[in-house]
Amino acid sequence: MDLILGGGYRFGGNKTRFFLLLQSGVKFYDYPVATQSDSITSINQDGRRIFTTRATFGAEYYLDDKRAFSIDLFQNQIWQERDFWDDKKAAWGVSVGFITSLF
């Protein structure tokens, strides 16, 4: 799970809008830790956290004032080498969605 905050900027016209987001925060994850006592080996999950950033570029196409299709291209990055995280490696993703107002 990631807990991230940041700022962004939205621009464009009435039908098509674009946005940029730059965010940073904390990634929470579990890491297996093995302990041995006599002939018994126990493997437990240790809750850990690490600094992360995310950059997002997205586009929205509005069908009317309250409904739109969206597509986002984002990149998450870990800035430390620890546990199974490689230093400065990034993960890329795409999100496609439908946006609407509930009220």
Image (tube, rainbow, N blue to C red):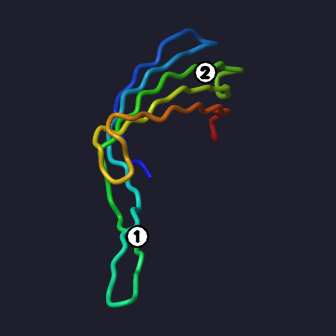
Tell me if residue 28 comes above or below residue 73 in the rendering.
below
Q: Position of residue 67 (x, y in %)?
A: 67, 28
Q: Residue at x 60, y 12 (%)?
A: 14
Which residue is tagged 1? 45
Residue 41 or 29: which is nearer the viewer?
41
Q: Which mark is residue 60?
A: 2
Q: Residue at x 39, y 35 (%)?
A: 89
Q: Is residue 4 rendered to the left or right of residue 65?
A: left
In which quadrant of the rendered image does the C terminus lie? top right
Direction front: furthest residue: 39
Res 63 → quadrant:
top right
Q: Is residue 63 rendered to the left or right of residue 54?
A: right
Q: Is residue 98 rendered to the left or right of residue 54?
A: right
> Dot 1: what SS?
strand
Res 55 → quadrant:
top left
Which of discs 2 and 1 lies nearer the camera? The answer is 1
Tell me the distance, in whole angstroms, between the alpha carbons under discs 2 and 1. Answer: 40 Å
Res 62 → quadrant:
top right
Residue 39 or 29: which is nearer the viewer?
39
Direction right: furthest residue: 63
Direction top: furthest residue: 13
Residue 68 or 90: which is nearer the viewer?
90
Q: Residue at x 40, y 57 (%)?
A: 29
Disc 2 marks a residue whose amino acid type is Glu
Residue density around tag 2, few if under 14, some if 14–19, many if 20 or more, within 10 Å: many
> Dot 2: what SS?
strand
Q: Assess whether mark 1 and mark 2 are in contact (beta carbons under 8 angstroms).
A: no
Disc 1 marks a residue whose amino acid type is Gln
Q: Position of residue 50 (x, y in %)?
A: 31, 49
Chain-order first, disc 2 or disc 1:
1
